[in-house]
Each structure stands twice: as C-alpha cells, then as structure tokens.
Image (spheres, helix red, strand yellow):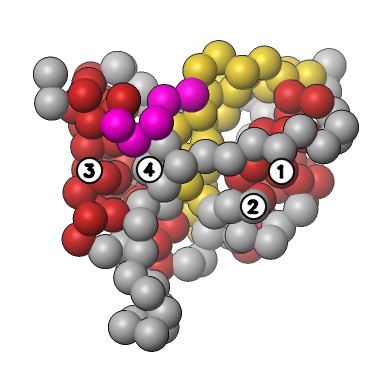
Amino acid sequence: MLIHLMQHGVCMPKELDPNQPLSPVGREQVEKSARAARILGLRFQLIIASPKLRSLQTAEIMAEQTGYPLSRIEITEAVKAMASAATSLDFIQEYDGLDTVLIAGHLPSLGLLASQILTQGSGLEISIENSGIMQLDLTFKKNKGTLNWYMTPSQLAEIANS
C-alpha cells in the first residue's frame, strides 16, 4: 500500500478563528501541492482526514484535484495531532488491500506514523512541512515500510507552476 502523508496547510491563528481553518497562504500552498499531485498522476483509493477543519479542507482540495469524491473522505480521530502511531496504523490496516491512501493530517502524529512505518518504532524524528507530501510503501504482512519520496511545498509549487 502506498501511503501519502500530507500535513495540512498553514492555518489561521486560534486568536483570529478558534476553528483554525486554512489561511489564505495555506489554501494557496495546498492548491499548488494538489495541482502538483495531479500532474504527477497521483490518484487515491482512500483519503483520510482528521475532524479538524484545516485537515478536512486540505483533504477536500486534494480530492478535487485528483478526482476523488468529496463524499468519500473518511474523517477519523485516528489521525488527529496527538494520535499514536499504533492508533493510526490500526485504522489504516482496516483498508489493507487498497493500493493508494492519502492522510491529510497533523504533526506530531504524521511524523510518528512515518517513523513507526520506517523503523518499527526506533524513534526516528520525522517532520513534514505544511502542504508537503511524503510517500511510503507499507507492507502490512511484513510490518515494514520504505520511503519512496518526500517533496516540500516549494518543490510541489515548482511542479504545479511548470
């Protein structure tokens, strides 16, 4: 299974909006990353978001650009910012058999999930920039994963603008 981890775009400060939606800059970042994903030919059989508005908005923009039905975005607490890697992996494993999944989520949970997949829990510190995308190849039967690539928002913007 190819798992794509994407941190939501930059959000509004909590003082300005307690729901912390994407800021105009964050929306633009995600739109560029989504266009780049489309150009790269990324298609998803499942898109997962946390209940946080910024995560859902990121997932919706990615879905629109990659042809995924908005009504099928899976919203779950299992990918919230403080979710454990084990919780996230248990949730994803329910979909074992799918080829491609996108998780529009948060730090630190995305970094912890990537670390668990790549090192089986040895504690590698991994960070994903806002609107960056990481692709991991996970084999549940072997409980082992491989980092295929990671692109920063700047790299994705270059692809989107090409």
The type of residue carrying mark 3 is Glu
The type of residue carrying mark 4 is Ser
Q: Are marks 3 and 2 in contact (CB under 8 Å)?
A: no
Helix, strand or loop under label 4? loop
Q: Are marks 1 and 3 in contact (CB under 8 Å)?
A: no
Quadrant the C terminus occupies: top left
Query: Disc 4 designates what residue?
Result: 131
From the top left corner, tell me how far across and down residue 150 is, in percent: 48, 24
**Dot 1 surroundings within 10 Å: few (below 14), some, or many (20 or more)?**
many
Q: Residue at x 37, y 25 (%)?
A: 43
From the top left corner, tell me how far across and down residue 64 is, in percent: 24, 42
- State the extent of the magenta-drawn residues as a range: 150-154
Query: Disc 2 designates what residue?
Result: 108
Query: Disc 3 designates what residue?
Result: 31
Q: Residue at x 52, y 51 (%)?
A: 105
Query: Disc 1 designates what residue?
Result: 112
The type of residue carrying mark 2 is Pro
Helix, strand or loop under label 3? helix
Q: Is residue 62 left or right of residue 87?
A: left
Q: Is residue 107 left or right of residue 60?
A: right
Q: Tell me the distance, in whole angstroms, between the alpha carbons under discs 1 and 2.
A: 6 Å
Q: Residue at x 32, y 41 (%)?
A: 62
**Dot 3 surroundings within 10 Å: few (below 14), some, or many (20 or more)?**
many
Vertical position of residue 18 compared to residue 67: above or below? below
Q: Is residue 85 left or right of residue 36?
A: right
Vertical position of residue 162 compared to residue 108: above or below? above
Helix, strand or loop under label 1? helix
